[in-house]
Amino acid sequence: MSGRPDVVVLDYGSGNIHSAVRALERAGAEVTLTKDTDAVLNASGLVVPGVGAFAAVMSALREIDGPRWIGRRIAGSRPVLGICVGHQVMFDRGVEHGIPAEGLGEWPGEVTALPEDAVVPHMGWNTVRPPENSVLFEGLRDERFYFVHSYAVQSWDFDQSVESMHPPKVTWSHHGADFIAAVENGPLSATQFHPEKSGDAGMQLLRNWILSL
């Protein structure tokens, strides 16, 4: 045993997986790239990467029973981290080219196109505005992170009907309009940007997540 937390990167056919694996290893995790049911359900942490179209990512996740695995982990307070489209699919739905696709529905909201007057895709470094009590962004005030996307969740309407419930911690960024850059909600966290491409700041964010496992 290495003493390093074991993290599974979900292997469902998404691109850019190996850079996430390498970054997580550098950040201090023992990483396995797999779609094995037992490994996915029992690892200390699960990372759901994602590039491309929302509907295509959801289709690929369904092919390997990914939504059920992700739901079981969250229900059992087992940490999950979504990245890029892996962040987007945690919301209710995505609308691309006018066609809606259902997401995992863990958070309320629609993934829609960034404003027409913004340069898309939003590609490159940008600042974020995390809440004061963020775990992911501990020690990362005023840092910049690397984004590659044309769609985002641009509003947040969380039903705080249970007073004892801790509301999700929402981090914002701006490109033509404000959009959600990250969410932390109990065992489930996700980032619209790519921490594995975000240099030292991204590495620290991954360390913060791994330390919370």
Image (cartoon, grey):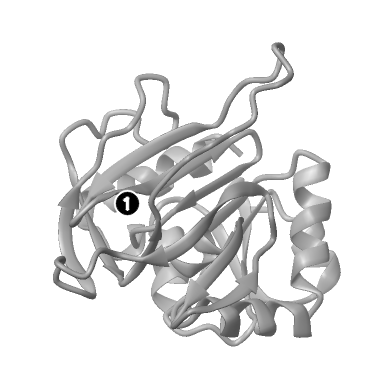
| Residue 87 rendering spot, x and y as whole percentages | 51, 59
Q: Quadrant of residue 129?
A: top left
- Residue type, mark 1 in image: Met
Residue 83 appears in the rendering: no
Mark 1 = which residue? 203
In the displayed structure, 156 sits above or below 12; it is: above
Helix, strand or loop status at disc 1: helix
Q: Is residue 75 left or right of residue 110?
A: right
Quarter of the figure that contains the C terminus: top right
Residue that extends furthest to the top in the rendered view of this protein: 163
Identified at 83% across, 53% down, the residue is: 72
| Residue 196 rendering spot, x and y as whole percentages | 34, 63
Q: In this rendered view, identify the residue nearer to me: 203 or 178.
A: 178
Q: Is residue 204 left or right of residue 14?
A: left
Q: In this rendered view, identify the residue nearer to me: 17 or 104.
A: 104
In the displayed structure, 8 sits above or below 209; it is: below
Identified at 52% across, 54% down, the residue is: 29
Q: Quadrant of residue 136?
A: top left
